[in-house]
Each structure stands twice: as structure tokens, then as C-alpha cells.
Image (cartoon, rainbow, N blue to C red):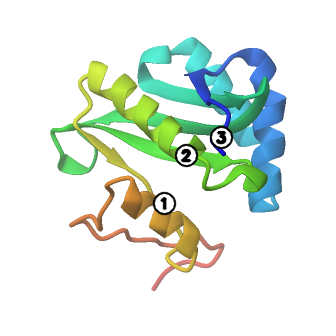
Amino acid sequence: MSEKPVAVRPVQPPDLDAAIALDRQVTGLSRRGFFVKRHASLGADPGRFAWLVAERDGSLAGFVSAHLQEGEFGGTARAAVIDAIATDPAQRGTGIGRALMDALEADLRARGVTEIRSEADWTDREMVRFFAASGFALAPQLVLNCPVTAEARP
């Protein structure tokens, strides 16, 4: 049995609530503020953002959101950073993620992007496997994190 086709297209305003709901279903968190701000930023400066949705049977089945960078952290390559990606858990393994990544790569390639970056919790094996299957590898950079606290540092 073959899966029904997946259509990937740029996000539209009516997709926002469905994307927020899907992200909440996948992460268990409401990140409404992030997605509303990202959608507004996309509208204000579409050249700096990419946000695609996947539809199957007329319903949102997944999405990917990225922002473009140029020159950050001393680099010179035009890069994109995936901020959020999700697929309907009931449809995982049916090609939605692959269709999203293929469309994102094509869109970014047309914009002169030469590298896509993202982060994943290393214990989230499903996400790490997905990124590996999509051609990602460990980056040569070390990601550093410093919590901001109310206490002064010594």
C-alpha cells in the first residue's frame, strides 16, 4: 500500500494555529509566543526566514521553520538554522519529514545557502536518527551554554 502524496508549500497565516497545535502535541509545550513572533518576522523580512508546511489529505501533517544567518560566529558561509520541525506522530515514517527537508534544501539552495544547522537533544534518538538520515553530522563547533542567574559571577 502506498502512502497518499505529501504537498509541501510555504506557510500561510491560516496554518499558524495548526502548526502550534502540532508542535504542542510533539513537544508537550506551548510555544505559541515563539511561533507568533516567527510568523510576524517572516512577514516583515521573508528573505531571512523559511517556513514550509506539509499537507496530506488537506490537513497539516508537518512543518519546518528556519532562519538564515550570514557571518555569525566568525563564519563566512550563508547558513540556515532549523528552529523547529515536527511531523504528525501518527504519520511518522511515511515520508513527510523527508519531503519537508527536500523542499527546505531546494528553497535554501536557491537563496545561496550552503549549510543547514540545527540542534537536537542527544537523548532524543528519533530526532537524531532523522537528522542523520537527512545528511546531518556532528558539527566541528562546540555549543556552549551559560545560564543567566541573578547572582554575580566571581
First along the sequence among labels 3 and 2: 3
Q: What distance separates the C-alpha of mark 1 from that of mark 3?
A: 19 Å
Where residue 44 sits in the image (x, y, percent)?
57, 13
Q: In the rendered view, tell whether residue 59 sits above or below residue 10.
A: below
Q: Amino acid at mark 1?
A: Phe
Q: In the rendered view, tell whether residue 19 sits above or below residue 153.
A: above
Residue drawn at point x = 19 percent, y = 48 percent: 74
Count of marks, rendered view: 3
* Badge nearest the viewer, 1 or 3: 3
Q: Is residue 149 left or right of residue 89?
A: left
Where residue 72 sits in the image (x, y, percent)?
28, 43
Work out whether residue 43 can be spotted: yes
- State the residue position of label 2: 97
Task: Give yes or no for contact between labels 1 and 2 (Cβ–Cβ under 8 Å).
Answer: yes
Near-viewer residue (101 or 13)? 101
First along the sequence among labels 1 and 2: 2
Where residue 32 sits in the image (x, y, percent)?
80, 41
Where residue 124 sits in the image (x, y, percent)?
58, 74
User: Which numbered dot is residue 110?
Assistant: none
First along the sequence among labels 1 and 3: 3
- State the residue position of label 3: 3
Q: Amino acid at mark 2?
A: Gly
Q: Quadrant of residue 92?
A: bottom right
Q: Residue furthest left?
A: 76
Q: Secondary structure at mark 2?
A: helix
Q: Quadrant of residue 145?
A: bottom left
- State the residue position of label 1: 130
